[in-house]
Image: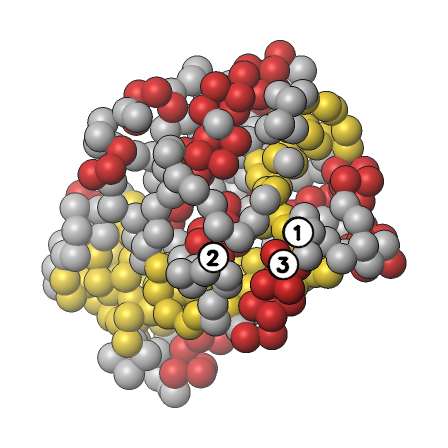
Amino acid sequence: MRTSDFYFLSPLNLLAKFPKQERDESKLMIIHRMNQKIEHKLFKDLHEYFEEGDIMILNNTKVFPARLFGNKEKTEAKIEVFLLRELDPKDRTWDVLVDPARKVRVGNKLNFGSGLTGEVIDNTTSRGRILQLNFNGPHEKLIRKIKELGKTPLPKYINRQPEKNDEERYQTVYAKKEGSVAAPTAGLHFSKHLLKKLEIKGINLVEITLHLGLGSFLTVEVEDISKHKMDSEKCSINENVCKIVNSAIQKKKRICAVGTSSMRAIESSVSSNKNLNPFCGWTNKFIFPPYHFSIANSMITNFHMPKSTLLMMTAAFTGFDLIMKAYQIAMEKKYRFYSYGDAMLIL
């Protein structure tokens, strides 16, 4: 398949710039792969499609305030820095994006205020830089200062300044392990009340961790999909989760990956007998059609951007024709798109 196959006219009027007042009041499209049937529900109806002993795999990563605003030394030009990942705590070096990129070169110094400064020490790629952060104090104090000065890293296409509400709503209610620069958006629809309802019904809620980088959300620039390279993201799956999931596989239970990040994580550690293995490391797994999924037999996800790796993975799981039909129906029925948008359950 080609990247252009995954293009559709992006529905700007359906782009969700703000979250729903109640998390589980989002729309939920149900896609049945076996009979091609499509239903329309609310996310709070999710429990109706699961039974006792079924599994939901949640990504418990937590977004950190990765967006810093500073000024360039001497010229005082305003520079925005997006912290992607810490490369070396000892050297205080970070892989970052800068905007506007053309104004920042190796050797430039940036001042973020409150004693936090940075120096560009390398050009890593055409879009990235390596920034060395400086602050008078130990590494722990530096991290606290970043959190104090940083802003919630809302996706660029939301095109507004973060508000106080975003600090809470751009996190899942089960977020625990800090390290993502973007939220696992399928999980944003879960309320504490809905999670309790699922638990009471006997659905097993297990947690893995995959820290999302910017790579998951960048559009694919090459026409030959197989030539696209994913950025690596840190992932952790513990042994107890594997035991629960593998037992459910043997019992032929419904296993649902909540979000493309959860799906990518579990597909990065599959044994030869199609069971889930413990994992702790980095994954650059890129899933696109055709692909055979080994662990999950259902998935919850949002409505994604054209030509994105997330749409490609969803198409691999759902079937290309069916997912494109579903997107067309979503636009006709005014579903909300992207991070703060509505969701689909693929069965």
Q: Amino acid at mark 1?
A: Lys
Mark 3 / mark 2, whichever is N-terminal:
3
- Residue nearer the viewer, 304 or 14: 304
- Residue nearer the viewer, 344 or 216: 344
Query: From this viewpoint, which residue is outermost toward the top?
Result: 332
**In the rendered image, is residue 90 in sight?**
yes
Q: Secondary structure at mark 1?
A: loop
Q: Amino acid at mark 3?
A: Gln
Q: Position of residue 39 (x, y in %)?
A: 72, 23
Mark 1 / mark 2, whichever is N-terminal:
1
- Residue drawn at (32%, 79%), measured in percent from left and top? 89
Relative to 36, 309 lies left or right: left
Pointer 1: residues within 10 angstroms few (<14), some, or many (20+)?
A: few
Query: What residue sits right under mark 1 in the picture?
Result: 252
Query: What residue sits right under mark 3 in the picture?
Result: 250
Pointer 2: residues within 10 angstroms few (<14), some, or many (20+)?
A: some
- Residue nearer the viewer, 11 or 304: 304
Q: Quadrant of residue 195?
A: bottom right
Pointer 3: residues within 10 angstroms few (<14), some, or many (20+)?
A: few
**Is the C-beta separation of discs 3 and 2 under 8 Å?**
no
Q: Amino acid at mark 2?
A: Lys
- Residue drawn at (81%, 54%), measured in percent from left and top? 52
Cα gap from disc 3 to disc 2, whole angstroms: 11 Å
Cα gap from disc 3 to disc 1, whole angstroms: 5 Å
Query: What residue sits right under mark 2 in the picture?
Result: 274
**Is the C-beta separation of discs 3 and 1 under 8 Å?**
yes
Q: Does residue 347 lie above or below 253 as drawn? A: above
